Amino acid sequence: MVLHSIRPWRILCANMLKWFYEITTSKSMLKKPLFWEMFILLAIVGGLNYIATIYHLYWSIYEFDSIVHFLGGATLSAFFLWLYFFSGFFKPKNRSLKSFLIITTIGTIFIGVSWEIFELFLGENVLQKSEYPYDTMMDLIMDFLGAITVAFYAFTKEEENNDNK
């Protein structure tokens, strides 16, 4: 019974590794819009989080958490836009600003809310109970602002590419 339930996970993991290998070894994939911007943002967020954790910057610098959430929302937005519009996995016909905003908003807010629920269940909220709703809403707002910023950036870049053709 246990071996039977492991097989689908093995297949899923193998397919994900194959997909990741194809993305990272495909030269055309590396030239797609937002690919490098996404990884640069991811490196910045990872580096800031690492430094902030070591030096307790989340607790010693007021609103440092908001900066990281803004950049995290931007990173998620870049990923969702790249995946939907530029990766080649989907073939969207409508590339309007509205569709860019919808993709970024839905994806980023879903991940942001999921993260806040994860923190709540994990017990990561070291704030006083009276400050927790404010902190959560501020985190989600900063995620959203980062997502909207990248949506406008990506749409502008898309329009420039269309004008150059």
Image (cartoon, helix red, strand yellow):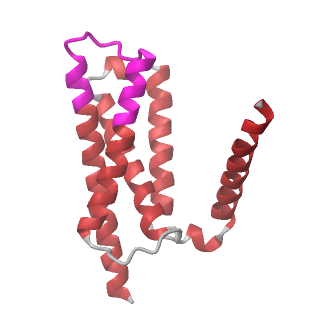
Residue at 72%, 37% in the rendered image: 5
Percent x, y of residue 62: 26, 23
Q: Of residues 116 and 42, which is closer to you in this image?
A: 116
Residue at 36%, 43% in the rendered image: 110
Percent x, y of residue 25: 69, 65
Residue at 30%, 22% in the rendered image: 61
Percent x, y of residue 27: 64, 72
Query: Which residue is situated farthest in the bottom direction here?
Result: 165
**Quadrant location of residue 10?**
top right
Residue at 27%, 36% in the rendered image: 140
In the picture, measured across the screen, residue 33 lies left or right of residue 128, that is right
In the picture, measured across the screen, residue 116 lies left or right of residue 8, that is left
Q: Of residues 133 and 7, which is closer to you in this image?
A: 7
Query: Would residue 68 be seen by someone viewing this image from the given angle?
Result: no
Query: Above or below — where is 103 with respect to 132?
Result: below
Query: Above or below — where is 82 with respect to 68?
Result: below
Q: Which residues are magenta?
A: 113-137
In the picture, measured across the screen, residue 39 lies left or right of residue 106, that is right
Residue 131 on the magenta segment: yes
Quadrant for the C terminus, please.
bottom left
Percent x, y of residue 41: 44, 49
Query: Which residue is situated farthest in the top direction here?
Result: 128
Quadrant for the N terminus, please.
top right
